[in-house]
Amino acid sequence: MMQDWDFLIDRTDLSLTEVRPLPAPDTVALEDGEVLLDIERFALTANNITYGVYGDRLGYWRFFPADANWGRIPVWGFARVRRSTVETIPVGTRLFGYLPMATHWITRLERKPWGVVDASPHRADLPPAYNSLIEAAPGPLDDQIALLRPLFLTAFLLDDYFAGHADFGATTFILSSASSKTALGLGWLLAKRGVRVIGLTSPGNTGFVEGVGCYAETRTYDSLADTPVDGQVVFVDFAGNPDVVAAVHHSLGDQLVHSAVVGSTHQAGGAVGPGRLPGPRPSFFFAPDQARQRAKDWGGAVLNTRIQAALDDFIAANGWLQVRTHAGDAALERVYRIVLSGQARPEAGHMVTPAPGD
């Protein structure tokens, strides 16, 4: 195991990875405005794989750029300021936010009236939601927050978007990849306000999906058309599998009033193609756009308060998450391949501590 390292991924083939040594954190000279972060722990979920799949299209590779074909998939986690040239961000400040998969990282931080932001010039035109870092004292729910908050944020913004559009007149929602943490968050939020939700999943995950309690009905992908669905329907695709999208559209046709593409948990399927489908054209939901609008409408502080309150309720009401911690670069490589291949169990929450284990 390396003591100080950086985990890189081939942008053209997410299965190719490389662990590179980093200079020891106390040997690097900092420029004015820079801080050095010790990365404590971060979550690794299918959502991070989605960042890689859509990395060029949506700019995810630009947050922590690398050389040649290599890139750094962003993760959500906790870091502590080890060295700082910024007076308002002293050594010891603990932050939660967007990080690279590495033992430590040098970046430019600024304190704004609403909090800490990454002020690196190459991130100036990237979504503000990803540039903000939250000061976070250690707590008993750190792992749950790292694993669920980024995914629940997307679920919260989706639910808010649909509620703002009166659910497009639908009485039923169908969510693909129903075992994914983002789908579970959206299903729970929709069910809380009385919306009927059908979860689509693979046969191996049916028992888990039925047991979480947020879906009125669970169907496997190949059984969707076996029983009619009443009324108008919104379809939310978290799988990114064009065959699933096509099956839903052909099965429901004019019953579909909205079709949203959110994630890509099924890597083999690729992106949804442009072929003509019955019903509405699938539209990509980009959570930062909705976050930007709500920050403008409500203010950033109110938005964060509402998200955190809803997340607290979600964590309290859902005890299915099983946290698994992996230490060091070799362990990261192993769990990365598990998540990339889609073999991670839906109830598992994989956390990585960059420091080697005992």
Image (cartoon, rainbow, N blue to C red):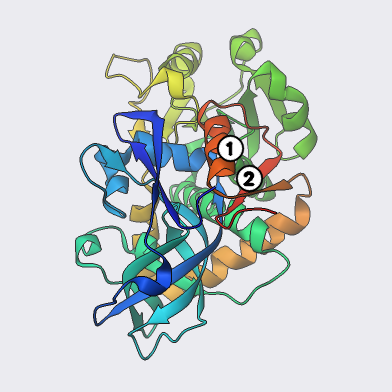
Would you name the residue on which mark 1 appears?
A: 335
Across and down, in percent, residue 210 comes to 76, 30
Give the class, few, some or many, for how many residues have Cα within 10 Å of label 2's Cα (few <14, many ≥20). many
Residue name at image x 37 percent, y 62 percent: 23
Name the secondary structure under disc 2: strand
Q: Which of the two residues, 256 or 115, is positioned nearer the viewer here?
A: 115
* Rendered location of residue 216, percent (x, y): 72, 32
Left of 167 or right of it: where is 275? left
- For image coordinates 35% across by 22% down, the residue present is 272
Question: Quick check: 87 above or below 144?
Answer: below
Q: Position of residue 287 (x, y in %)?
A: 40, 50
Whole-number angstrom distance, CA of label 1 to CA of label 2: 8 Å
Extreme-bottom residue of the structure = 87
Residue 323 vs 57, above or below: the answer is below
Q: Is residue 262 visible?
A: no
Disc nearer the start of the sequence (1/2)? 1
Residue drawn at x 61%, y 46% as measured from the top left:
185
* Res 13 → quadrant: top left
Asked if one can make out residue 116 in the rendered structure from this viewpoint, the answer is yes
Determine the residue positioned at 26% across, 58% down. 126
| Residue 62 vs residue 258, the one in the foreground | 62
Element under label 1? helix
Per the image, the residue denoted by label 2 is 350
Disc 1 marks a residue whose amino acid type is Val
